[in-house]
């Protein structure tokens, strides 16, 4: 069973990978280049592109059913100092997934993790929140409120 520290590390890793996968590819690439980190690494496995099965639930709480398939790409890398990173994302962008795996490996060091969190992940999270707010505002602008008028007659 994992202790609290291991649980926190696993949760931080999930959060980090979620941010990297949700970020716009252009913003992700731009922020990565601005970070200025370019470590040497070797690819251990992949990049491999295949299908993952999606499951759905009626109303969010019913029994799961097969919803369909989605294309996903995964890769594993090893840095020169033997840190290993893994990443898997929807889509076929092998370069993006490879960078995410490198970031996963880099984040195993506290100094690298702090730099990546503050200079890469924080701006990515801000851009995701801004994009989501814009989409919500655009969706709200098209909302139609239906109402029923009651006639005074019985």
Image: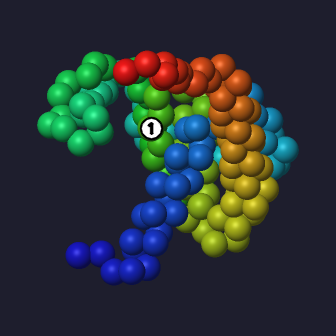
Q: Is residue 30 left or right of residue 56?
A: right
Residue 112 place in picture, x, y as percent: 69, 64
Looking at the image, residue 80 lies above or below residue 7: above
Quarter of the figure with residue 96:
top right
Residue 78 place in picture, x, y as percent: 51, 50
Q: Is residue 38 left or right of residue 108?
A: right
Determine if residue 48 is in view: yes
Residue 103 place in picture, x, y as percent: 61, 50
Coloring applied to the structure: rainbow
Q: Residue at x 56, y 53 (%)?
A: 16
| Number of numbered labels in the structure image | 1
Residue identified by numbered label 1:
88
Looking at the image, residue 48 lies above or below residue 2: above
Extreme residue in the left direction: 63
Determine if residue 98 is in view: no
Q: Residue at x 50, y 58 (%)?
A: 13
Q: Nearer the viewer, residue 142 or 42?
A: 142
Q: Residue at x 60, y 21 (%)?
A: 144
Position of the C terminus, as image quadrant, is top left
Q: Nearer the viewer, residue 78 or 90?
A: 90
Q: Which type of secondary structure does the marked residue at label 1 adopt?
A: strand
Looking at the image, residue 82 lies above or below residue 23: below
Q: Nearer the viewer, residue 77 or 113?
A: 113
Residue 48 place in picture, x, y as percent: 41, 26
Position of the N terminus, as image quadrant, is bottom left
């Amino acid at each position: 069973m994992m202790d609290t520290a291991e649980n926190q590390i696993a949760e931080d890793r999930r959060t980090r990978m979620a941010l990297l996968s949700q970020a716009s590819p252009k913003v992700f690439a731009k922020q990565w280049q601005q970070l200025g980190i370019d470590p040497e690494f070797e690819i251990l496995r992949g990049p491999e592109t295949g299908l993952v099965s999606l499951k759905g639930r009626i109303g969010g709480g019913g029994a799961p059913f097969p919803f369909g398939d989605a294309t996903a790409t995964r890769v594993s890398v090893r840095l020169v100092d033997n840190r290993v990173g893994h990443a898997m994302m929807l889509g076929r962008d092998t370069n993006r997934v490879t960078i995410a795996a490198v970031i996963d490996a880099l984040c195993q060091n506290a100094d690298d993790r702090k730099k990546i969190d503050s200079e890469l992940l924080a701006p990515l999270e801000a851009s995701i929140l801004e994009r989501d707010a814009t989409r919500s505002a655009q969706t709200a602008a098209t909302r139609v409120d239906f109402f029923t008028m009651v006639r005074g007659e019985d």
